[in-house]
Image (cartoon, rainbow, N blue to C red):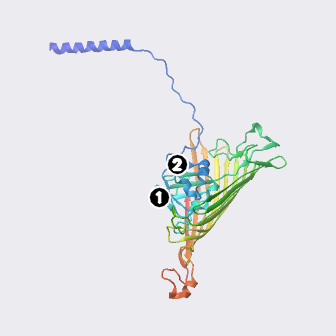
Amino acid sequence: MYRPALLRGASACALILASLATAKAQVSLPQIVVGAAQGTPATPPLDRANETVVTQKEIVEEKPPETDTAKLLEHQPGVSVQTGGGVSGIPAIRGLADDRLKIVVGGVQATSSCANHMNTPLSYTDPNTIGRVEVVTAVSSVSKGGDSIGGSILVTPKSPVFATPVIAPGVVGPGGAPVSPILAASPYPPVPYLPLPAPGTLRFGPNNEVLATGTVSAFFRGNNNGVGVSANINMANDHWSLLYNGSWQRATNYHAGGNGDKVLSTNFMSENHAVTLGYQNEGHLFTFRGAYQNIPYQGYPNQRMDMTRNRSYSLDALYKGAFEWGTLEARAYWHQVFHKMGFLEDRFWLNHPMIALGRDFGYSVKAEIPYSDQDLFRIGNEFHGYRLQDYWPSDPTGFTQGFATPPGSLSRPFANVNINGGQRNRFGT
């Protein structure tokens, strides 16, 4: 019993001595104040890892070698392009393409009416008309429109440019700095202004209040004798703006490398025209855009048939406004296309068309309401309608030839209706 008691006493003494030593070793530290600044105003979230933006600078760098809008995206992570005709590549995001993606061009959600997806939505615009492209390489959020399982491609056309208000000839507004038509706290980027003077601009009018800007470009390619020209012209004052974008391009069949043979059905011709009228005043912007496209022919070397006509029209009206309670954006659009497949002369001597008539229309309304310095509410509603008529017209010429017609010529006396008044309606909130 004596030994355990001795051990307990020694342990107690050791603990007391250790506590005293620790107390002597303590050093008083200065007071540390931890704080945080007040939260910054609510701003749109930064692009996530699955969202990339092709800027105007990147588009300008890619324009010389590219005539196909889809080709502008093939360097983006997760995006590949399936080559079709000269201006109708099909983008794929992580292997998903066509209707699995949501593609919006200038607010217009165009549907590929062709059964072979020859007239892809990106083929309805030219690289010359694009301001920026946003690519979402994942399931799209509600704010991006949703309605896809593969991702979204959102194309924003070039915006109209407004002139800086002029007080007197050669004098700009107060401080020389333009005032944005959309409030600085708004998540919308400000509508671009051009200061006075600016290189490459023209001023005219009684007080130099009218601004004119423009660019013209052209190209030639030797392999397929490709030629093209594009232009954009903008005339504006401080409230009104009129923008025109146009392009035309043509190419013949190209040749294989070295002294290779000609590759048939690689020729194409395309023209695009778009006019945008804009009005802005005290934080409110209205734009009305009309576009027209005509593709007389476009060869598809890897498909059974070619495009022998594609003509489309589109209208788009947009309103953006900044209020004390937040911002509001409303849009309405309409798009119609006449598409015809057939055989070009260098492929097959007997042509039998397949025709598709498609029409897209809809609207969207979105509001963003700051609740606090760090909280932001988004609410909106949209509708997209689609109508399709797809048929193979009758061919009386082939019918009168009877059995003299070559086998497989697809001749018949009556129209073959594939889709009769097809409809698709979608609401989203």
Report the quarter where the C terminus lies: bottom right
Could you give the CA–CA distance between mark 1 and mark 2, rounded to whole angstroms?
Answer: 16 Å
Q: Secondary structure at mark 2?
A: strand
14 over 159 or under it: above or below = above
Q: Amino acid at mark 2?
A: Glu
Q: Residue furthest right?
A: 206
- Specify whether 246 is left or right of 75: right
Quadrant position of residue 155: bottom right
The residue that disc 2 covers is 51
Residue 4 placement (x, y as % from top left): 17, 16
Q: Nearer the viewer, residue 320 or 296?
A: 296
Q: Is residue 314 visible?
A: no
The label on residue 140 is none
Marks 1 and 2 in Cβ contact (< 8 Å) = no
Crowd tier of the residue under label 1, counting other residues whose Cα lies within 10 Å: few below 14, some 14–19, many 20 or above: some
Query: How many other residues sit within 10 Å of disc 2, few (<14), some (14-19) or many (≥20)?
Result: some
Q: Nearer the viewer, residue 345 or 19?
A: 345
Q: Of marks 1 and 2, which one's residue comes earlier in the chain?
A: 2
**Residue 201 shows in the view:** yes
According to the picture, the residue beneath numbered tag 1 turns out to be 96
Query: Horizontally, is 230 left or right of 403 in the view?
Result: right
Residue 346, image x and y in percent?
A: 55, 73
Residue 233 position within the rendered picture, expressed as x and y whole percent measured from the top left: 72, 54
Q: Nearer the viewer, residue 65 or 204?
A: 65
Vertical order, 295 against 195 (above or below): below
Count the numbered circles shown.
Answer: 2
Q: Is residue 108 above or below residue 407?
A: above
Tell me the kind of residue under disc 1: Leu
Q: Nearer the viewer, residue 303 or 394?
A: 303
Image quadrant occupied by the N terminus: top left
SS label for mark 1: strand
